[in-house]
Amino acid sequence: MSTTETPKEAAPSFRIDVGLHEMLKDSHGLKDLDDPIGPVEGGLPEPVYPQHPEFSIRWKTTRSYNNFKRVRTWKSLGAPYFKSKMMPWELRPLIAYLFSEWKCNLDCHYCWSYDNSIKGMTEPVAKRSIDWLHETGNRFLALMGGEPLLRPHFIHKITDYATKKDFLVYLPTNGRLMKPDVIDRLGDAGLAAVNLAVDVVKEKPGLAKALEPIRPYFDHLIKVKANYAMSTFFNVCITRTNMDDVKELTKMAKDLDIGIDFHIVESPLIDSPHFKHLNENSTFLTPADYPAVDDLIDWIVDQQDHGVKVVNQRDRLLQMKTFMRGHTEPWGCRAGINTLIIRTDGTLAPCFPMYSANYDWGVAGAPKFDRQQLTTMKKECELHCFSTLNHIVAYVYNSGSVIKWIVRNAMKNGLTKAETTVD
């Protein structure tokens, strides 16, 4: 693939209906408060390090190791899921995204999900947010950015505090600040998963999330991840200029026996004035690129069928073909019901693409999600969104899909094992 910038026509500044966009960006929608979360006292406790100096003692047997992971998964996802199904009228976030930062140390040209003018989250806001999420029954916390590891000690404190409250803590990162000492401290504090965002092997113009610059850090992560019961997987965005790299990273994931998750490049869902690369963006797909992307997606599905641990659902991967051509069917998004985001200032929004919206959905501790508003909004925004995790959450909250999954696995495997692919 070419490594030089290729000028492209300007993309639209937003992709949703004009009326909905005006409502979401209305400057009167979100209250202008110096401290939106309200008065909060105190910060996060200082973590003890190391807490587990000898993991060989902690994991005496393979069985004890696997039992620990099973119990953690049940506490973080199983029990909260069933409780939320019993209380469907309540806000019960199965997955919560805590944005400790909206700043980033890299400038990937397709990425509008950061703004270096935004202040990072404070310790009191983080503590109040985690405490409130715990009260709602949530036990799965994703630490988001920007780049969360801009302040590694802050992330260490959040991880330690949350895991002691039985949260499964999940960290997406570009890896540039993921030094071995940072990995060890977070692993010792209980970090459960690292989502390593890499789009290319060697850095290319407009694609800064590369494996080569972080290879020593990555090798250390692979070496110690089992010590900490820490899952690791690649997160790759399919763009115009990295299709060969996508294949190379997929093969590497198979060789290392780790997972891999795919996204497809998207322009902003709502207007994001901070985004610097809307015009002449070489990473955005054009109709001329669609056949090559089709072939790449078919290749990924084939790799999934042959044992690569692809996180995406099979059918959802195939739907990337129609999505990039502007066609998406409603898929039952649960954002604002069973998922939510907490911005750096403690304000709430239903999902990532709505981070820049001005609509008032409340703050941590005082949510204002309205089912009717969400339903009306999603009739439009669902048709322009390809969220992987929100789609998985929508799938598991569809009773028909779950029953179908159970019956299929019972007939095929006698419930002795379960396959992760879905229809």
Image (tube, rainbow, N blue to C red):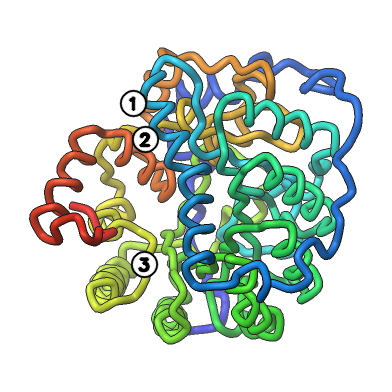
- Residue drawn at the location 43% of the way across and 27% of the way down: 83
User: Element at badge 2?
Assistant: helix
x, y percent for residue 57: 68, 72
- Which residue of the protein is positioned furthest toward the left in this rendering? 411
Residue kind at label 2, given as amino acid type: Glu
- Residue drawn at the location 24% of the way across and 78% of the way down: 306
**Please, is residue 41 above or below residue 64 in the view?**
above
Tell me how far mark 3 sits from mark 1, CA to CA: 29 Å
Residue kind at label 1, given as amino acid type: Lys
Left or right of 72? Residue 104 is right
- Residue drawn at the location 66% of the way across and 76% of the way down: 56
Q: Which residue is mark 2?
A: 382
Residue neighbourhood size for the residue with mark 3, other residues' Cα within 10 Å, grouped as few (<14), some (14–19), many (≥20) = many
Q: Which residue is mark 3?
A: 310
Left or right of 360? Residue 388 is left
Tell me how far mark 2 sits from mark 1, CA to CA: 6 Å
Q: Which residue is mark 1?
A: 379
Relative depth, front residue between 87 and 110:
87
- Residue drawn at the location 28% of the way across and 72% of the way down: 304
Q: Quadrant of residue 320?
A: bottom left
Residue neighbourhood size for the residue with mark 2, other residues' Cα within 10 Å, grouped as few (<14), some (14–19), many (≥20) = some
User: Element at badge 3?
Assistant: loop
x, y percent for residue 27: 68, 19
Left or right of 248? Residue 46 is right
